[in-house]
Image: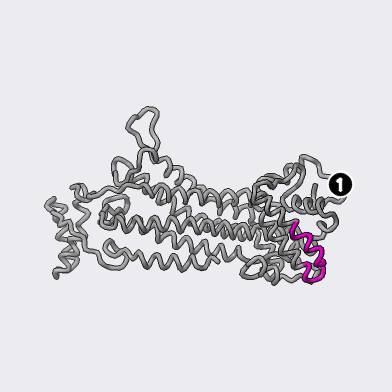
Amino acid sequence: MQLWNKGFEPDKLIEKFTVGKDQELDLRLAKYDVQGSMAHIKMLESIGLLTKEELDILLPALEEIAQSIEKGDFKIDEGVEDVHSQIEFMLTNKLGDIGKKIHSGRSRNDQVLVDLKLFFRDEIKKIAEACDKLFVRLQNLSEEHKDKLMPGYTHLQIAMPSSFGLWFGAYAESLTDDLQILLAAYKIANQNPLGSAAGYGSSFPLDREMTTNLLHFDNPHYNVVAAQMSRGKTEKAVAAAIAAIASTLGHLAMDVCMWMCGNFGFVSFPDELTTGSSIMPHKKNPDVFEIMRGKCNRLQSIQNEIALLTANLPLGYNRDLQLLKDIIFPATSELIECLEMADFMLEHIRVKSDILDDKLYDYIFTVEDVNRLANQGMPFRDAYKKVGMEVQNKTYKPTREVHHTHLGSVGNLATSQIAAKKNSILSQFK
C-alpha cells in the first residue's frame, strides 16, 4: 500500500529493497507525523481547503492516533510503506473521503522533513539534559575533591601538580563547548520546512507562518528549495554535535581506564561495577568505560558517513537520503545511553588521597620550586638552571608546596563561572 499508487504494484524485491528499515525506524517519527498533520490541517481550514466541520472530525481522529502512539499500541501494518502512509490510511479507513484531504498542499518530502525536524529538536533537548546532568555530577565531584592533588602529565610523562578538582572540572567545562555545538544543531533543526512540498512550493495559498507558530519553530525555512536542501544538512549538524560530545566522553573514559590501572591506582569503583577474568582471579576490569570509549569513537565516525552519503547529490530529493535515518537515529540513543552511564558510574567513583606523597612524584614539584625562587627575586632562567642542575645531580629536594591562585587553577577552579556559562547556553534551548 503506497500513497503514490497509480494502479500498479512494484516488484516485491524492489519494494523490500527500497523500503529498507523504514517500517522499524519510522515508529520513532509517528507522534511527530501526527503533530505535523494537526498543524497542517488547521492551516488548511484557515485558507478554505477544509471546512470547520471537516477539521472538527479530523482533529479528534488524529488525537486518537496520538494516544495509541503514546500507549505503544501503534504499529505499521504489513505491506504499508511507512508511518506517513499508515496514518493517512487509518484516517481514510475511519473517516472515508475526509481522511484523503489532509495531504492537500503537502508532499511526502516536506511531511518527512517536518517529522525529522521535530524529532531532532526533541532528541537534541534530551542530549542537552543528559549533558547537564553529567555536568552537575562532574562539578560536584570537582568541588568535593578539589584539595586532593594528583599528577599532571605531558607526553605521558610526570609534569606538574594537578588535582582531582581540576580533572573533574575540566570535563565539565569541555561539555559547555560541546553544548555550544549542540545549540547550533538545535537552531538549524528548529526551522519549519512544511509548505515546501516536493521542494518547489505549492499553488495553494499556504500559510507557512501559521504552521511555524503552531509547531513552535523559530522561523520557517523561507526558500522552499533551501528547505529541501536542509535534508542531510540538518543531520550533519546533529552528527557534529554528537561527535563533539562523544569526543569529550571518550577522553574521560580513557582517563578512567588509565587511572584504574594498577600502575596508577588513582581511582576505583565498587566490585559490582567492574568485571573479572576467566583465568586471573585478581582482575577488576573497567569494561563499562572501555565499551563507552569504543561507542564514542564509533559515534565520531557518523559525520563522515553522512558526508559521504550526501556528497554531490543533485538538487532536490533523492532516495539516498532515506538511509540517513539508519545512521542518525541509533546514534542519538547511543549517545544518551553513554552520558547516562557515565553519570551513573561517576556517582560511585572512589578517589585516592595523598598520591603525591610517593617519592615517585618528587620531580613534579620542580616548577613550583623554580617559581618560588623567582618570587624571591632570582631571575627565572637562573632559577630554572639551579633546580635543573639539582635534578641532574640527584640532589633535588622538593618543598611539596603548591601555590596556584589564578583563575582556573588548582586553587581557583572557577566552578561558579563555568556553571554560569553552561546555564547561559542551556537557556537558549527553548
Q: Give the amino acid at mark 1.
A: Phe
Q: From the viewer's perspective, is 46 left or right of 136?
A: right
| Whole-percent x, y for residue 127 in the image | 52, 56
Q: Which residues are magenta?
A: 44-60
The crowding category of the residue bearing disc 1, from other C-alpha atoms within 10 Å (few below 14, some 14 to 19, many at least 20), is: few
Q: Quadrant of the C terminus?
A: bottom right
Q: From the viewer's perspective, is 129 left or right of 412?
A: right
Which residue appears at 60% of the width and 58% of the height?
Answer: 120
| Whole-percent x, y for residue 150 in the image | 27, 52
Which residue appears at 32% of the width and 32% of the height?
Answer: 282
| Residue holding disc 1 | 8
Q: Residue furthest top?
A: 279
Magenta stretch, main secondary structure, is helix
Magenta residue check for 388: no
Image height check: is 279 above or below 324? above
Q: From the viewer's perspective, is 410 left or right of 366?
A: right
Observer-nearest of 52 and 222: 52
